[in-house]
Amino acid sequence: MGLTLMGSCATYSDKTQLARDAVQRGDLAGGEKQINKFLRVGKSEKLPNEWKKETALAVLERAMILQALGMYKLSARDFQAADKELELLDIARDGVGQIGKYMFSDSATKYKAPPSEKLSLNAFNMINYLAMGDLSGARVEAKRFTVMRTYLEDYKPNAVHGAFGSYLAGFVYEKLGEPEAAMRYYDEVLQQRPVQSLTPAIRRLAGQVGYRSPTIREVLGEVSPVPMPPSGTAAPPATQPAPQPPPSAAPAQPPSSEAQPGGDVPVQRPTATPTETGPQVASTSKPVPANLLASGHLQAPVAPVFQGAGGPPSEILVVINVGRVPYKVPERMPIGLAVGLAGTYITGDTRILERAAFKFVNYPRLVPSGSLYEQASIQVDGVDAPVELVSNLATEVEAEYQDLLPKIIGSAITRMITRALAAEGARAAGKQSQNAGGIIGFLAAAATEGALAAADKPDTRSWTMMPAFVYVARVPVAAGQHRVDVKIWGAGGREKRQYKLDVKQGGYAVLDVTTLR
């Protein structure tokens, strides 16, 4: 199908359908072209001249596609530009009905990103900077991520909030030689899900800092002796975890602002110019011209060498982003018609159907993206390496939507009542006609309510290109060149990718593998 509706009645999900179709086929360049057309720019090197109410969201979509293409410099620029323009949908301090009203086109102006999108934006941009070997840029994104995560933790404590961002932030601070900050971020990850690949790093950092929490102590196998109670009191257990120091956190406030399915088909990707420690894509096509590298369309990142005392072993960090999260489409729920039919059955009065014909509740419904892949595995130099699912962003987006749904439906019902009142006004005016007033009143009411129902478009804007699953593999290696084979698969087929990495003694390489299928 893939027909994009560009008329005034088209929703955001309608307008971006062609881009999603291209990405689903594995045509990332085609998806990039469609988003550029939406932004009215000729190429991705350009930012829009005018930022309208959907522009920031479309730039965010392009940033994710550029990351999947390995254009890390341009992707980082787009993420930063979108972040500055995006407003936060403040779910923690919402007045009654305000969020519900926002979800409809006549109330919405500039797009407001829900916290899950703002949080993930900074986390994915950390990947760009890590792939380019820029720890300073990654640190900035880590700080922004922390502000948003603190906001979410205050709003809904103990929920899962972007664990992969905490993992990456911990990695950034570990490589910057700031072990206590790294330990705190790793603790955030472990409070959300067990991640075995953090154990070696936590044990290494534990010798440098005194930070401990129940989860960290569990990893380290540490317990603290409990003082003996005064005589005559009940004795507590023999051991208990030491108290957790309060983490340093930002104030809780809103921040400002490819292969076809059905078989193993290698993805054709260009070869990067060799560097000392950066990831290298296996040679599968002609060499890349120097001007392409200079343009930012392909990065040859250099990972700095760790300078801490003694230093950790050389290692490879692989981040695999798979699939796409659910997105919003307009949904029409005919609850009024159902009520009308039930009333007719009971009373036998068919006139009630006149007033129920346009009693629809219009709202933005979340639907699956239809992604082809859900799983990933890797081999390093032909040996299987453990891969862990660190974040299931699809479930996080769904949980956030379910929290907002009562307000959305409540606002939709209010709008339905408003349409009905307008129709009754037209009906009353029509009945004043001397000739066939009943028919004229009915037609006037139907025309009024029908027009209002047709114009009542729910806001379907959301970050449709956000990956659904984030996997991480962290593998200690000897210094030198290594081959990394990545397999990605799911109900829609599978594909293989191969990369070559150079890692210096005591250094590291970060490999990003992003498929939006």
Image (cartoon, grey):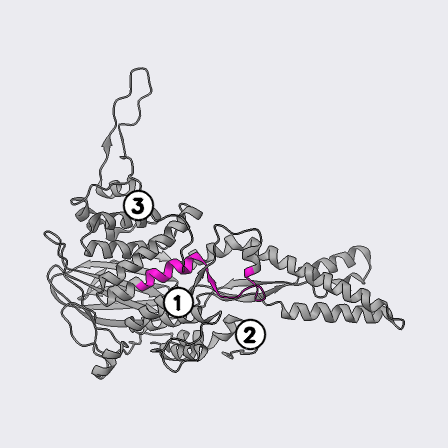
Secondary structure category for the residue under label 1: helix
In the picture, residue 352 is in which quadrant?
A: bottom right
- Looking at the picture, how far across and down is residue 268, in whole percent? 28, 79
Identify the disc placed on residue 82.
1
Is label 2 or label 1 in front?
A: 1
- Looking at the picture, how far across and down is residue 365, in whole percent? 54, 62
Q: At x 66% / y 67%, what residue is drawn? A: 453
- Looking at the picture, how far across and down is residue 444, in whole percent? 77, 70
Q: Residues within 10 Å of mark 2 (few under 14, many from 20)?
A: few
Q: Nearer the viewer, residue 284 or 149?
A: 149
In the image, taking residue 430 as reference, residue 479 lies left or right, namely left
Instruction: Say what amino acid the circle numbered 3 marks.
Output: Ser
Quadrant of image for the C terminus: bottom left
- Of marks 2 and 3, which one's residue comes earlier in the chain? 2
Q: Which residues are magenta?
A: 102-125
Residue 327 lies in the magenta-colored region: no
Identify the disc placed on residue 227.
none
The residue that label 2 is drawn on is: 10
Secondary structure category for the residue under label 3: loop
Compared to residue 227, the image places residue 282 above or below, namely below
In the image, taking residue 391 as reference, residue 9 lies left or right, namely right
In the picture, residue 267 is in which quadrant?
A: bottom left
The residue that label 3 is drawn on is: 248
